[in-house]
Image (tube, coloured by chain):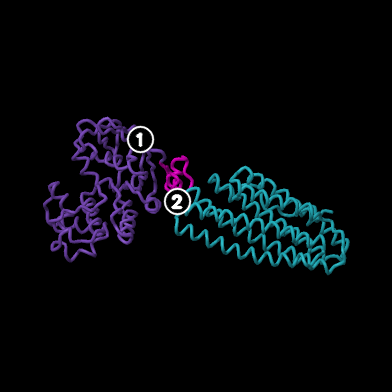
Chain colours: A cyan, B purple
């Protein structure tokens, strides 16, 4: 085995896991900023997102170097391709953490309200998805990735419920529309983070088994329009 | 048109040593099949069995069958010279006839087969050199320069033209680029890709990137056995056998 090549692969894995940790922490911080109504926490998310972006560049560069210089094959090729895609997904998770922070800052301008959406529960589900997706990458276990795919529809359903509940709430409380929109956008960002965790899990499955499982399961739940209109 | 290849239960011995064990492989007509594997795995022996060249080695023995097109080349009574006439071969080191002109090198096979008509020879020589992507470089010195006066890459293309001149059903290439620089290698690879419209090609290579670039199918040999044979993209992205995976990722041994 080419030791320089193996070192490159190990470094790529280590850096991606590090970036995964940063993205995961940014999401939790952003949700904390919302629940604690703490602008400093939101500010910290913006700083972390810059680090995530830097990390994305470094990983891309390393992966492209390995492709160009070492011409990886088979499982190594799938690994580098998966890393490139996961890298992009993690960067988007960082962006979505920023979106949540911006909505949290906006909500801080509104009176504190008990909106009919369980953001904490949704965050727990999404964080679990991200963590398990990264665990599947760390352990190279496709079955762990598979479990993430199964969780995606749960999070999608939570977002749909949030949509339905918030529409009803806005009708009853027109003075809270702005806050409701912020909350809806937070729920939407969390659901998107779940989608990125799903992508990561799919990429791990591709790396480990060579199977392309994208677009095979139920995806992209639309809000239940009957429930919204048929009240 | 190229011919399909069907190899069944091929076993080969040199003296007491068995060098190929129970090889079964089908290769489609007008496709490029690459044969890869570590040194000594039997890949060169394998392609030499496809034109009965292995039997020129003293002590060589074979069982099984090899069908090229509709001809069982090991059928009793089958003349090995007839077989080789239908199957062109290009070797690792370019081997033009050094004292012959470029023209005579290409025409040699036809003359051996009894073709003497000047006009026909002229046409076949030009067509073969064009197919080998050498015509433009040598058309003005066809009879003035010897084969040996060309560069290594040109000599190899000359050998390809010589092999093509007899219009073979199958072209065997045994590491045809290993002595060539990257530019010449690129030209030969491009050529192989184009030749498959008219011929079936089997190429032995140590260069896995080359196999990935030129071949439709790839077979991996290890210790005399065909471990895996599949579409090239499958072999190089998701091989089925761990031994193939270990070899192509460099974890072998």
Report which residue position mark 2 lands on.
A2
SS assignment at label 2: loop
Where B200 falls versus B25 (above or below)? Answer: below
* Quarter holding residue A93: bottom right
SS assignment at label 1: strand
- Pointer 1: residues within 10 angstroms few (<14), some, or many (20+)? some
Report which residue position mark 1 lands on.
B23
How far, Cα to Cα, is label 1 from label 2? 31 Å
Question: Farthest residue in the bottom direction?
Answer: A109
Residue B232 colored magenta? Answer: yes
The answer to whether residue A223 is left or right of residue B173 is right
Magenta residues?
Answer: B229-253
Give the residue displayed 60% in from the left and 46% down from the top.
A139
Give the residue displayed 12% in from the left and 47% down from the top.
B114
Say which of marks 1 and 2 sits in front. 2
Q: Position of residue B140 (x, y in %)?
A: 18, 66
| Quadrant of the frame with the C terminus of chain B | top left
């Amino acid at each position: 085995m080419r030791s320089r090549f193996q070192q490159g692969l190990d470094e790529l894995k280590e850096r991606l896991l590090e970036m995964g940790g940063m993205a995961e922490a940014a999401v939790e911080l952003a949700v904390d900023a919302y629940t604690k109504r703490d602008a400093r926490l939101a500010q910290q998310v913006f700083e972390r997102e810059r680090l995530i972006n830097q990390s994305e560049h470094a990983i891309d560069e390393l992966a492209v170097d390995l492709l160009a210089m070492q011409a990886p094959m088979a499982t190594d090729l799938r690994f580098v391709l998966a890393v490139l895609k996961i890298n992009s997904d993690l960067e988007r998770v960082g962006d979505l953490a920023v979106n949540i922070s911006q909505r949290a800052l906006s909500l801080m301008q509104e009176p504190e309200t008990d909106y009919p959406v369980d953001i904490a529960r949704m965050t727990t589900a999404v964080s679990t998805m991200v963590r398990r997706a990264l665990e599947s990458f760390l352990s190279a276990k496709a079955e762990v990735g598979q479990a993430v795919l199964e969780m995606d529809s749960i999070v999608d359903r939570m977002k749909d419920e949030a949509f339905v509940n918030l529409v009803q709430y806005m009708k009853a409380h027109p003075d809270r529309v702005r806050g409701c929109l912020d909350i809806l956008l937070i729920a939407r960002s969390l659901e998107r983070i779940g989608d990125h965790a799903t992508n990561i899990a799919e990429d791990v499955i591709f790396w480990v088994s060579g199977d392309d499982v994208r677009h095979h399961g139920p995806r992209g739940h639309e809000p239940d329009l009957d429930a919204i209109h048929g009240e | 048109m190229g011919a399909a290849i069907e190899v069944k239960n091929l076993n080969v011995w040199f003296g007491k040593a068995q060098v190929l064990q129970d090889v079964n492989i089908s290769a489609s007509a007008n496709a490029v099949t690459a044969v890869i594997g570590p040194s000594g795995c039997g890949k060169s022996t394998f392609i030499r069995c496809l034109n009965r060249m292995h039997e020129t080695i003293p002590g060589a023995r074979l069982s099984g069958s090899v069908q090229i097109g509709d001809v069982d080349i090991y059928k009793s009574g089958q003349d090995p010279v007839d077989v080789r006439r239908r199957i062109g071969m290009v070797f690792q080191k370019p081997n033009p006839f050094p004292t012959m002109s470029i023209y005579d090198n290409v025409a040699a096979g036809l003359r051996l087969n009894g073709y003497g008509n000047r006009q026909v020879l002229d046409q076949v020589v030009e067509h073969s050199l064009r197919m080998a992507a050498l015509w433009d470089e040598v058309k003005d010195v066809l009879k003035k320069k010897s084969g040996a006066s060309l560069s290594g890459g040109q000599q190899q293309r000359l050998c390809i033209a010589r092999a093509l001149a007899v219009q073979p059903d199958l072209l065997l290439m045994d590491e045809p680029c290993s002595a060539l620089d990257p530019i010449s290698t690129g030209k030969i690879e491009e050529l192989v890709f184009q030749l498959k419209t008219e011929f079936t090609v089997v190429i032995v290579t140590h260069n896995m990137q080359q196999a990935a670039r030129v071949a439709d199918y790839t077979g991996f040999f290890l210790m005399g056995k065909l471990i895996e044979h599949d579409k090239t993209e499958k072999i190089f992205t998701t091989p089925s056998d761990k031994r193939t995976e270990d070899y192509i990722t460099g974890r072998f041994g």
